[in-house]
Amino acid sequence: MHAPRLIFHPKDPQQIIAHDLLQQSMWEIGFIAEKLSGHADNSYAAGEHFIELLSFLGCSPVIKMSPQDGDNYCYIEWIDRPVAELICGSQPFQPRCNKCRQLLSDWQTQLNNGSSIQCHECDSQMALEQVNWKQSAGYASQFLIVHNIYLHEAVPGERLLMTLQKLSGNKEWSYFYAI
Ligand SMILES: [Zn+2]
């Protein structure tokens, strides 16, 4: 079972930002600090402005920022996929047709057919990136994962999203939560 995660990705499912650019930019705004050993490649400790950039909700959250704080500390990782992929947690939202609002109840079996889902009610074809997953899944080739953030525990601030958008040639990023 996975720890809870807040996951960012470019809205353009083909887009991948070069790792050195991503690292430099996330470092400059203080979102990441040093590279972490004992983790997958491209895993970084939370930076000095991590908490401000994410805007934590609720009163005085206890955020573990480093391995010295114990297990389940927050850290950042990014992964690339050779082709775009839908990533979701164990309880993804059941999506609806964009046109007729019918529940797309067999979307999971349809994923094997490629990058779109068909509505059996009205026959609409929806690209996976156009489906409204209600922040429970994302379709992309690159994912920036913040580990150990619970659903709606934190939301990304404007500065973080704008920095990612700037890196993408002014294309927007999305985010979702997964467990
Ligand atoms: Zn439909």
Image (cartoon, rainbow, N blue to C red):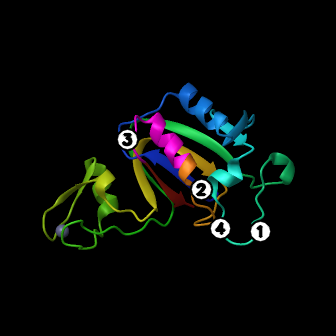
What is the C-alpha distance between the residues marked 3 and 4?
A: 31 Å
Is residue 40 in sight in this rendering? Answer: no
Is 152 included in the stretch rendered in magenta? no
Q: What stretch is highlighted in magenta?
A: 160-172
| Left or right, 86 with reference to 131 | right
Percent x, y for residue 3? 64, 57
Residue 63, image quadrant: bottom right
Considering the image in quadrants, where does the C terminus appear?
bottom right
Percent x, y for residue 5? 59, 56
Q: Residue at x 54, y 52 (%)?
A: 158
Residue 125, image quadrant: bottom left
Q: Is mark 3 within 8 Å of ligand 1?
A: no
Q: Name the residue under label 4.
A: 57
Mark 1: few/some/many CA within 10 Å (<14, 14-19, 20+): few
Q: What main secondary structure does the magenta stretch of the protein show?
A: helix
User: Hey, what amino acid is under mark 4?
Assistant: Leu
User: Hey, what amino acid is under mark 3?
Assistant: Ala
Q: Between residues 168 and 34, which one lies in front from this camera angle?
A: 168
Q: Name the residue under label 3.
A: 84
Q: Name the residue under label 1.
A: 60
Q: First in sequence, mark 3 or 4: give its number.
A: 4
Q: Name the residue under label 2.
A: 5
Secondary-structure class at tag 2 = strand
Q: Between residues 15 and 38, which one lies in front from this camera angle?
A: 15
Q: Which residue is drawn at 68% across and 72% down?
A: 58
